[in-house]
Amino acid sequence: MFRDRQEAGEKLGIELGKLQLRQPVVLALPRGGVPVAVEVAKALGAPLDLLIVRKVGAPGNPELAVAAIVDGDPPDVVLNREIVEAYSLDDADLASLIDGERPELERRRSAYRGNREPLSIAGATAIIVDDGAATGTTMKVAIRALRRRSPREIIVAVPVSPPETVADLAREADRVVCPSQPARFHALGYHYQSFPQLSDGEVIAVMDEAAQRPQHRNQKRSPGPGSGAARETTTRDGREK
């Protein structure tokens, strides 16, 4: 069990620091992933950015994702083809559903990022950070979108996740770093002593503070807007690393 998200991020940072990563860029999934990612970025001396994902719900069942929009320039749309086929959605249906979620994506981008341009991850080691992964659905969408942006490699870094989810994510990412993999996962908050919900204001404050730190000297910005000892690091081909 972790004391709080800060401690979880510190532990992740220690484990990631052992990997001697080339040109790391830390990407936080808001909101809960932000305080974790801050500590990871500090440990690695790496720049911090956000990766904003907005779920597109199925007709009449908004909790079931038919697609997701991942912030970028332009935003990436990742389809859940099994759900699309199950609902017999055509291109016009999908376009309508996706367009309905774009305003909220834009609102979050404007609120969280302000005038800061997103970081480019082309040729970099992209590290996606969240405060945990129960099913890994959002994380998988993020990985698939980032693949289109030509990173050197993609690493998933979460403090806690069930073993089956870690294995699932290892088939999508190049590596997965997860210190705690309990067989009985329960809810994510069960693995933290302190697990408050974060507000938009807290996310903004953290990102404003991170923006004041010197950027990694090799990092370029995008030209457009846009618990104890850790387990092994798992690679895409299943090897221990």
Image (cartoon, grey):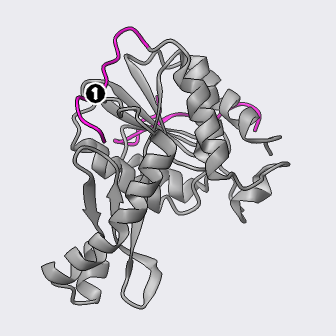
Principal secondary structure, stretch drawn in magenta = loop
Residue 156 left/right relative to 84: right
Report the amino acid beneath label 1: Arg
Residue sticking out furthest to the front: 115
The correct choice, above or below, for 130 with respect to 39 in the image is: below
In terms of image quadrants, where is residue 159? top right
Q: Nearer the viewer, residue 26 or 167?
A: 26
x and y percentages locating residue 139 in the rendered image: 45, 53
Residue 151 visible from this viewpoint: yes
- Is 209 situated above or below 204? above
Residue at 31% of width from left, 24% of height from top? Answer: 221
Q: Residue furthest left?
A: 91
- In percent of width and height, residue 78 lies at 27, 61
Q: Which residues are magenta?
A: 216-241
Which residue is tagged 1? 152
Q: What residue is shown at x 61% (from left), y 51% (from top)? A: 200
Q: In what element is the residue under mark 1?
A: loop
Which residue is the extreme one toward the top? 217
